[in-house]
Amino acid sequence: MKKNKIWAIIPARSGSKNLKNKNILRLNDKPLIAYTIKSALESKIFEKILVLTDSLKYARIAKRYGAEIPFIRPKKISSNKSTDNELYIYMLNFFKKQKIQTPNFFAHLSPVSPFRANNVIKRGVKYFFKKKKNNFQTMRSVSEMEQTAYKMMR
């Protein structure tokens, strides 16, 4: 895995509609985002762990837990209708302008999955690189639904 450089990307915008500041809500005395940063650090597979946020407060918290903040995300790509693609295009253009060489691989780690174990991250990345030989370009983790799809879609 080491020969394939990979950066962890943790998108954490501050403008949640349903739960105000959900990414930094305290859970067992830590902000929610701290759990994802900790799992990424403990996995020891990422060259960099980046939090992409529109909030200086979020940035300070993320730095305290060991993440890097390459930029403060512009408001125009931080609304509840903004897409991950908009964020990634912005990020790649930012690094290109700064003449910062990026790796060929990124892992998107959601801050709202605080109980993700680092061994799950390792297994997922290992599986991706094993399957990459079979033309994998992207991979997404999923989990089994607790309710029937009918109840989820009402």
Image (cartoon, rainbow, N blue to C red):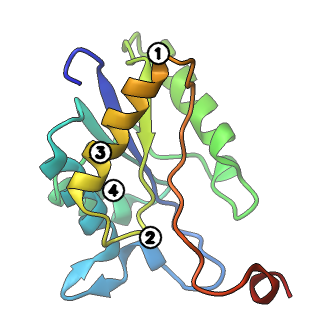
Q: Secondary structure at mark 4?
A: helix
Question: Cα distance, mark 4 to mark 2?
Answer: 16 Å
**Quadrant assignment for the N terminus:** top left
Q: Amino acid at mark 1?
A: Lys
Q: Local crowd at mark 1 within 10 Å, few (<14), some, or many (≥20)?
A: few
Q: Secondary structure at mark 3?
A: helix
- For mark 2, what is the residue? 112
Q: Amino acid at mark 2?
A: Val
Q: Amino acid at mark 3?
A: Arg
Q: Secondary structure at mark 1?
A: loop
Give the left or right position of residue 30, taking residue 89 as reference.
left
Determine the image quadrant of residue 118.
Answer: bottom left
- For mark 4, what is the residue? 59
- For mark 1, what is the residue? 133
Q: Report if the CB atoms under discs 1 and 2 are less than 8 Å apart.
A: no
Q: Secondary structure at mark 2?
A: loop
**Looking at this view, is 73 or 84 the one in front?**
84
Q: Which mark is residue 123?
A: 3
Q: Is residue 39 above or below residue 29?
A: above
Q: Local crowd at mark 2 within 10 Å, few (<14), some, or many (≥20)?
A: some
Question: Cα distance, mark 3 to mark 2?
Answer: 20 Å
If you read the primary sequence from the N terminus, does the residue marked by circle 3 or circle 2 appear first?
2
